[in-house]
Amino acid sequence: MRTSFALLQSVRVEGQSTHRTLLNLGRDFSIPKQDWPELAKQVTARLKGQARIPVQEEDEHLKNAVDDIVKRLLDQGFDINAKHPDGRDTILTDKVYNPDAKTVGGERLALQALELLGMEELLRELEFPENHIKLACALIVGRMLCPGSERRTHKWMAEASSILELLNLQEPSLSMLYRCSDRLHKHRHEIMNRLFGNTKRVLDFDETIVFYDLTNAFYHGREKGELLRRGRSKEKRSDCPLVTLALTLDASGFPRGVEILPGNASEPATLQKAIENLNGATPTIIMDAGIVRHEGAEGY
């Protein structure tokens, strides 16, 4: 029995799927069968005009076969983007756009990290209602992947993310997010301390160095907040009141403490409280020059 090889294209004619022969490759076509998918992939890419990325260990025999097939197809006037005989356009799967697509990769990774750190068990110990536990996890993931207000997080959950499907949750109301966020803020010290301890256990590192610094942000709106103060703005916005964020990190970049302070807070005036919040730990504290030059920081 004599065998001959041919290059085929799948098409749909009058609603029926069929094949048409593009090129007769002859009896002596010697590319192994296991390499045919890669051959077809490279030929398709070349015909679409996609740039080829050289690889260090390249199969020269396969490369020569691709070059030969592409040249022969182009010589006979083949156009990969031409319409099919029944007038239907080719569906290019690499160019299909779905306007309702939602992200899932980052959500799965973040949820796995929360599970590893025992987040749900911690929230149960803090007497969170069951309907708030998974919602709190969704809210935390939202802060990780799409930082913003509760309103922005609500929009992200409903329109851009698969977090609700992954946690088997119904879309929450905006007021539910506010209540859940308030509850998380109320227990923020217990949550941060427990999560940091669990992180140390999982990653097996020692707490030897702590970084401490403040930054501030200007505020638009009614000036009735108890933390709003006038002070030196790091963004040069002397026209707006400020709020200050105090952040304490360990050497690995994990947060040890986060506080929202009045807008005129300074590092020397808040450093002692930050050290006390380390719960007895005695690491080396690293700070910027503005603190150590201040006479009120002597002895720290």
Image: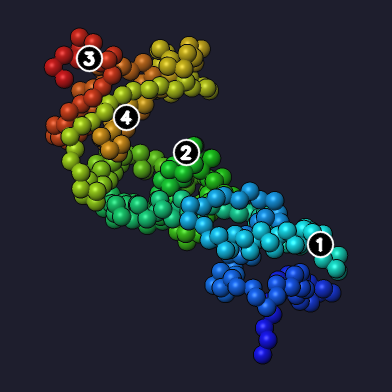
Contact? badges 3 and 4 (CB < 8 Å): no
Near-viewer residue (149 or 289):
289
Q: Which mark is residue 147?
A: 2
The residue under label 3 is which amino acid type?
Val
Give the residue number, with chain letter if any, for mark 3: 292
What SS does tag 1 mark? loop
Query: Real-space Cα distance between discs 3 and 2?
Result: 33 Å
Q: Is residue 284 left or right of residue 110?
A: left
3 vs 2, front mark: 3
> Which colouring convention does the figure follow?
rainbow
Where does label 4 land, which residue? 247
Q: CA distance from mark 1 to mark 4?
A: 67 Å
Q: Nearer the viewer, residue 249 or 272?
A: 249
Q: Relative to 56, does residue 84 appear above or below in the rendering? A: below
Q: Which residue is mark 1?
A: 76
Q: Residue at x 52, y 22 (%)?
A: 220
Nearest to the eye among marks 1 and 3: give it: 1
Q: Specify whether residue 190 is in view.
A: no
Residue 179 or residue 66, whichever sits in front: 66
Q: Is residue 62 left or right of residue 297?
A: right
Specify the quadrant of the image occupied by residue 42.
Answer: bottom right
Sequence-first tag of 1 and 4: 1
Mark earlier in primary sequence (2, 4): 2
User: What amino acid is labelled 4 in the image?
Assistant: Leu
Say few, some or many: other residues with alpha carbon within 10 Å of mark 3 (under 14 / 14 to 19 / 20 or more): some
